[in-house]
Amino acid sequence: MDTKFILVDVRERVATITLNRPDKLNAMNWPLLAELNQAIKNAEADDDVGAIIIKGAGRSFSTGYDMGEDMGHPPRHKMAEGVYHRSSVWNSRAHVEQHIEYWMDIWNLWKPVIAQVHGHCLAGAVELALICDLMVVADDVRIGCPLVRGQNVEDMFRIVAWHVGIKRAKQLQLTGDTLTAREAVRYGLANCMFAKDRLDEETFAIARKIAQVDPTLQMLNKHSVNKMFEIQGFRTAMEYDGVWDSLGHFTQTTWEKTFRQRGWKAASEERDAPFGGIWGRTFPIEE
């Protein structure tokens, strides 16, 4: 598989897929998402793969979706071959639902997927990390979605609620606070934490053990748990989540006005100023 934005390595029955835009802190554009989607499907079909790791190159796992020109052309609502809807509402819904489809492909995958997370894990990257079956974090990680302070509600960020419960989910959704590694483990977002310099070897060790289980049995193990959550409404909630994000695209916030007048940096600094900056908190850090 020829790739531009990811790296793929297979050894000892573990496929490691690395988001490879380190100069952009692995911000995810449409070509990267397409490559990632194809890579996990290739790993699923590979008899020499029993488990999959998704991680990021450089200083961070990912800062979320690329919000610049490098994002590429978003999907549009297709009415017929070569005919697309002109309504911006329909096309907004189409591109949000494509995000969700990519993430649900990981949920539906017949092999276990582990998110190996370090540095920044923000906005859309939180969706990617949490849709994976397990999450292993470095002690330097910051996880959250500051953009809910002024830009949008973020599609699929409600997945957090399935991990942390309603009160803490609202805490994060209403404040845009980011969590430390210890909080991520305590809240149930992450399975375990390691020092950053041990993260690669420790995550690989976990994946290698998981990969030794018979793949058919492992598929049953994974989906027996998934089905419990689907019975409670998980799949419906995730698929419907695109509605909230689409509506958010048409909310004329102060951030949107500042962004158009003065650019991304100024708008984001203004958004985070009442919170003490992007890493500022409304609730105290739990040690």
Image: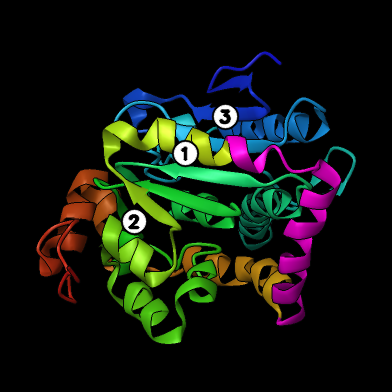
Percent across and percent down for residue 173 are 38, 74
Dominant SS type (magenta): helix
Cα–Cα gap, marks 2 and 1: 18 Å
Mark 3 vs 1, N-terminal side: 3
Of badges 2 and 1, nearer the viewer stands 1
The quadrant holding residue 209 is: top right
Residue 228 belongs to magenta span: yes
The kind of residue tagged 3 is Ile
- Foreground of the two, 107 or 218: 218
Q: In this view, does 114 lie to the left or right of 107?
A: left
Percent across and percent down for residue 264 are 27, 45
Of badges 3 and 1, nearer the viewer stands 1
* Quadrant in which the N terminus is drawn: top right
Q: Can residue 25 be seen in this view?
A: yes
Residue 172 belongs to magenta span: no
Q: Name the residue under label 1.
A: 203
Percent across and percent down for residue 73 are 59, 35
Magenta part of the chain: 208-232
Residue at 42% x, 65% y: name it: 152
Cα–Cα gap, marks 3 and 1: 13 Å
The kind of residue tagged 2 is Ile
Percent across and percent down for residue 161 are 49, 76
Q: In this view, does 235 lie to the left or right of 261?
A: right
- Give the numbered dot on residue 17: 3
